[in-house]
Image (cartoon, rainbow, N blue to C red):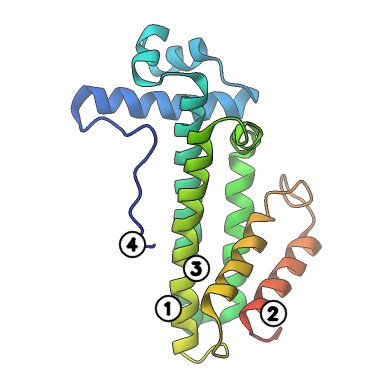
């Protein structure tokens, strides 16, 4: 994982009952959106075991709650990606196996929270906090990928070169996994082509 400092939006309460209520509301929002495709504050509050009025003491608007759920989803996706992008995995299993793992992890992550991604990305142009969440999480995962590429270069498993450019290209490929061709048991052939592309942009071979 990266060392990039990150603060969730809205910031979670420091601890105690307020923190538990906040976490319950975010989890309930994620579940509700993935179930129905929309966010209904009364349903979210009910799932969390609080009143709708209490929900609005933590989140000023529905979009703020979407931003918090989106933040959690992106954080989980970053963790999935970071767990696959390790130099140890490259040294043990090879570059291609490592890339296959991270592509599979991205597809799984996007698929599990597909409706949260859809709702949040639809609101991205209109709600600044959602944009801020997206940009901050994107920067954090890019830093993780850059560090991975630097380590793989240092281990001489790929040619020396512009680590940031290689990492940026890999990030774009992973973002492209949020696509109906891949989600819900999509085409393995498309996923394999993405792996080929990712290995190529990193400078590895296809063997």
Q: Report the residue at 50% width, 92% height from top.
A: 156
Which sits earlier in the primary sequence, circle 4 or circle 2?
4
* Label 3 sits on residue: 145
Q: Which disc number belongs to residue 73?
A: none
The label nearer to you, 4 versus 2, is 4
**How crowded is the residue under tag 2: few (<14 C-alpha within 10 Å), some, or many (20+)?**
some
**How crowded is the residue under tag 3: few (<14 C-alpha within 10 Å), some, or many (20+)?**
many
The label nearer to you, 1 versus 3, is 3
Measure how far apart labels 1 and 3 are at the Cα level.
14 Å
The front one of 68 and 112 is 68
Q: For the residue labelled by badge 2, is the local secondary structure a helix, a strand or a loop?
A: helix
Q: Position of residue 18 (x, y in %)?
A: 25, 23
* Label 4 sits on residue: 3
Q: Report the residue at 57% width, 80% height from top.
A: 95
Q: Position of residue 197 (x, y in %)?
A: 72, 73
Measure how far apart labels 4 and 2 are at the Cα level.
27 Å
Which sits earlier in the primary sequence, circle 2 or circle 1?
1
Measure how far apart labels 1 and 4 are at the Cα level.
19 Å
Q: Are marks 3 and 2 in contact (CB under 8 Å)?
A: no
**Is residue 207 visible to us here?**
yes
The label nearer to you, 1 versus 4, is 4
Q: For the residue labelled by badge 3, is the local secondary structure a helix, a strand or a loop?
A: helix
* Label 2 sits on residue: 200
**Is residue 76 visible to us here?**
no
Relative height, residue 112 to residue 47 (above, below):
below
* Label 1 sits on residue: 88
Q: Report the residue at 30% width, 32% height from top.
A: 12
Which sits earlier in the primary sequence, circle 3 or circle 2?
3
Q: Are marks 4 and 3 in contact (CB under 8 Å)?
A: no
């Amino acid at each position: 994982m990266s060392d990039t400092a990150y603060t969730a939006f809205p910031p979670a309460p420091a601890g105690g009952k307020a923190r538990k209520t906040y976490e319950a509301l975010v989890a309930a929002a994620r579940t509700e959106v993935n179930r129905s495709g929309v966010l209904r504050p009364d349903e979210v509050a009910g799932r969390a075991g609080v009143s709708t009025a209490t929900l609005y003491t933590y989140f000023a608007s529905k979009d703020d709650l979407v931003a918090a759920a989106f933040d959690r989803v992106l954080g989980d996706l970053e963790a999935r990606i970071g767990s696959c992008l390790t130099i140890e995995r490259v040294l043990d299993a090879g570059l291609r196996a490592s890339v296959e793992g991270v592509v599979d992890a991205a597809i799984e992550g996007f698929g599990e929270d597909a409706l949260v991604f859809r709702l949040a990305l639809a609101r991205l142009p209109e709600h600044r906090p959602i944009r801020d969440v997206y940009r901050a999480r994107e920067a954090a995962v890019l830093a993780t990928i850059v560090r991975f590429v630097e380590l793989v270069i240092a281990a001489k498993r790929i040619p020396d070169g512009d680590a940031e450019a290689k990492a940026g290209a890999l990030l774009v490929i992973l973002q492209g996994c949020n696509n109906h061709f891949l989600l819900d048991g999509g085409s393995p052939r498309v996923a394999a082509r993405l792996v080929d592309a990712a290995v190529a942009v990193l400078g590895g071979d296809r063997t």
